[in-house]
Image (cartoon, grey):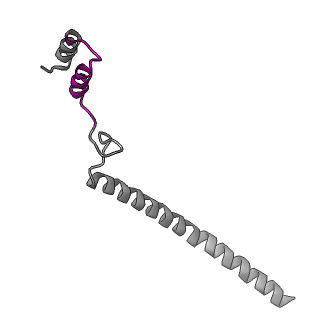
Amino acid sequence: MTALTTLAQYRMDYVDHMDGGWGWGMMALIIITVLAVVALVIWLVRANGLTRSTAVGGAPAETPMQILDRRLAQGEIAPEEYKDRAAILGGH
């Protein structure tokens, strides 16, 4: 019975030791690893030039003036409306 009590006490001390020291250390290591991975992904995205102005296919987004030019060319707006909107945008 004494051997069983000693074994149980050893087991309790071992578990308490692991929870007290390694638990916090492992949690800190996991947080540092996650932050490092997030920083790496952000760095890779910026290094490759992928920004919000880049469309899914890789073509850059149109500027407001380019959209206005395209709409005039497609006949969606009249030349008078084009002149008014271009003046507002500071173009032509």
Q: Position of residue 10 (x, y in %)?
A: 72, 83
Q: Position of residue 67 (x, y in %)?
A: 26, 26
Position of the C terminus by quadrant: top left
Instruction: Name, please, the residue furthest toward the top.
Output: 80
Q: Which of these two is toward me, 14 or 76?
A: 76
Q: Magenta segment range?
A: 61-79
Q: Which of these two is toward me, 21 or 47?
A: 47
Residue 23 against residue 45 in the figure, above or below: below
6 drawn magenta: no
Q: Position of residue 45 (x, y in %)?
A: 32, 53
Quarter of the image where one finds residue 70: top left
Q: Is residue 27 left or right of residue 49?
A: right
63 drawn magenta: yes
Q: Is residue 16 left or right of residue 27?
A: right
Residue 72 against residue 30 in the figure, above or below: above
Q: Is residue 80 left or right of residue 44?
A: left
Quarter of the image where one finds residue 51: top left
Q: Is residue 82 left or right of residue 23?
A: left
Q: Residue at x 19, y 17 (%)?
A: 86
Q: Which of these two is toward me, 25 or 64?
A: 64
